[in-house]
Amino acid sequence: MNIILLGAPGAGKGTQASKISDGFSLPHISTGDIFRENIKNRTPIGMLAKSYTDQGLLVPDEVTCQIVEERLGREDCKNGYMLDGFPRTIAQAEALDKITKVDLVINIDVDFSLLLDRLCGRRVCKDCGESYHITKLNGETKCARCSGELYQRKDDNPETVQSRLDVYKAQTAPLIEYYGKKGIVFNVEGNAAPEAVYAAISAKLNALK
């Protein structure tokens, strides 16, 4: 299965991506991780991407698509994958259509009024990327999954979060309609507990096997 995971910042994509990857043996393809890997390894495409980010510029779609296409061509994606963070725009979705066939788009739908609190209270593992909320940590500062250190991302503050939500509404939310016209969108209620959200997603994925 080739899956795209959609949802606004704070909708719980990171938590669900981890569960889906483990439960269905699908590689979790995060564009942020791909960029960091290519920049760290100083690949030609990574250095090209870095030339933009160093100037505070967005990496052009053409470069992003090249990086994604290379990653999807690796052996571990032969039997399927889960894309998280790509596509972000209609233009990227159209480019992706030329690279691969998407079987399902999982859209985690959450009331935007809840997302500000979710994100400002989020803590992320520096090692594996697992997300937690301060209300559930009981003072714990280590990741339950890998014992990595938990931290608050610099962009998890009210002003930046609101800006990110506005960008999502303008650029990424239209993807729901784009893929909806293809009949491959599965909307899941993201206001529920993470376990309930995963149960709904798991049932859908099992039905597609």
Image: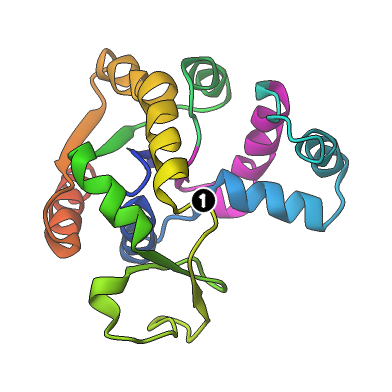
Residue 54: image location, x then y, percent: 81, 41
116 lies left or right of 141: left
> What count of labels does the image hold?
1
Nearer the observer, 72 or 15:
15
Q: Is residue 83 magenta?
A: yes
Label 1: which secondary element: loop
Which residue is painted at 20% across and 41% down in the image?
113
Residue 69: image location, x then y, percent: 64, 34
Nearer the observer, 70 or 177:
177
The magenta stretch spans which residues?
A: 62-85
Q: Is residue 38 magenta?
A: no
Depicted 176 relative to depicted 72: above or below: above
Residue 2: image location, x then y, percent: 41, 39
Which residue is painted at 56% across and 55% down in the image?
76
Nearer the observer, 95 or 56:
56
Depicted 16 relative to depicted 51: above or below: below
108 lies left or right of 130: left
Depicted 98 relative to depicted 2: above or below: above
Residues packed near mark 1 inside 10 Å, few (<14), some (14 to 19) or many (20 plus)? few
Which residue is painted at 51% across and 15% down in the image?
94
Residue topped by disc 1: 155
Q: Is residue 110 visible?
A: no
189 lies left or right of 157: left
The residue type indicated by label 1 comes to Asp
Name the image quarter holding the N terminus: top left
